Amino acid sequence: MKADVPNDERVAVVLLAGGTGSRMKANMPKQFLELNGRPVLQHSLELLAQVQQLEALVIVINDEFRELPFLTEAMAADPRIKFADPGKERQDSVSNGLSQVPDGCTLVAIHDSARPLVELDDVHQCLADGAAHGAAVLAVPMKATVKESEDGEFVSQTLERSKLWEIQTPQVVRPKVLLEGFRRVAKEGWEVTDDVSIVERMGEPVKLTQGSYENFKLTTPEDMVIASQILAGRAA
């Protein structure tokens, strides 16, 4: 999968790195754990700095971690990198990151730092789809059979797997659409689980960009082992 971001687009990336990662059972947030010689966050940071038409890369991160050597070196070398504070909820963190995006940017890609295995070609395809349709999200067809339960005790129905997609990041949106979405979330009390959910609630289209099953979210210690093996295989 190879696509180019249109030349007239100006891209910003919001990289979410403010989570605590409690399920990882580590003594620090998972985005700072070492993965094949580098912090998890550094893998995403270095890849996303290569995005076509990139104007700004905003890292949403707690103050206490901003002086880590790899971050201070990146800041010194690349003036496009900025910081923003995490919020109480995901949408608050995204909103804080969006506030640091220059006015001239026409696309914003929101990515979880706990997905260090995303590939640049997939990011570019998602951005190209977002440019064409207004919003896009990396996703893969669901492999597992999914059943719905009303009470948590018994199956109420089996969902049709051919219609189900597992959503990943980055999620790409026009900044003005996302800003309007945040306004409506606050005003109307919408419950949303991710960024493109806001776009869906607004009745706007969201393009599914097929990505890779390797772009999974690091959640447990076992995930770190699998991610290490995938990176080693790519390097080989």
Image (cartoon, helix red, strand yellow):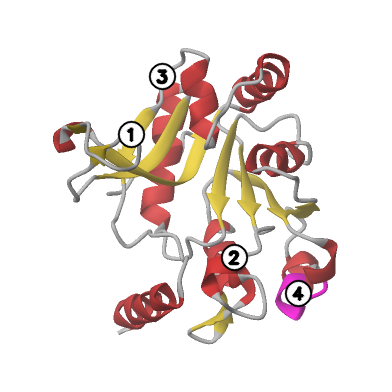
- The label on residue 208 is 1
Look at label 2 and name its amino acid: Gly
- The label on residue 73 is 4
**Are the two marked residues, 3 and 2, in contact with CB atoms closer than 8 angstroms?**
no
Residue 233 x %, y %: 29, 80
Look at label 1 and name its amino acid: Leu
Query: What residue span does the magenta drawing correspond to?
Result: 67-71
Look at label 4 and name its amino acid: Glu
Say above or below: 218 vs 89. Answer: below
Quarter of the C terminus within the rendering = bottom left
Question: Which residue is under mark 2?
Answer: 21
Q: Quadrant of residue 173?
A: top right
Question: Which residue is under mark 3?
Answer: 205
Question: How far apart in space, not on screen, are marks 3 and 2 (Cα)?
Answer: 32 Å
In the image shown, does 102 or 210 lie closer to the viewer? 210
In the image shown, does 107 or 91 lie closer to the viewer? 91
Residue 2 x %, y %: 31, 48
The secondary structure that most of the magenta stretch takes on is: helix
**Residue 69 drawn in magenta:** yes
Residue 193 x %, y %: 52, 36
In the image shown, does 30 or 75 lie closer to the viewer? 30
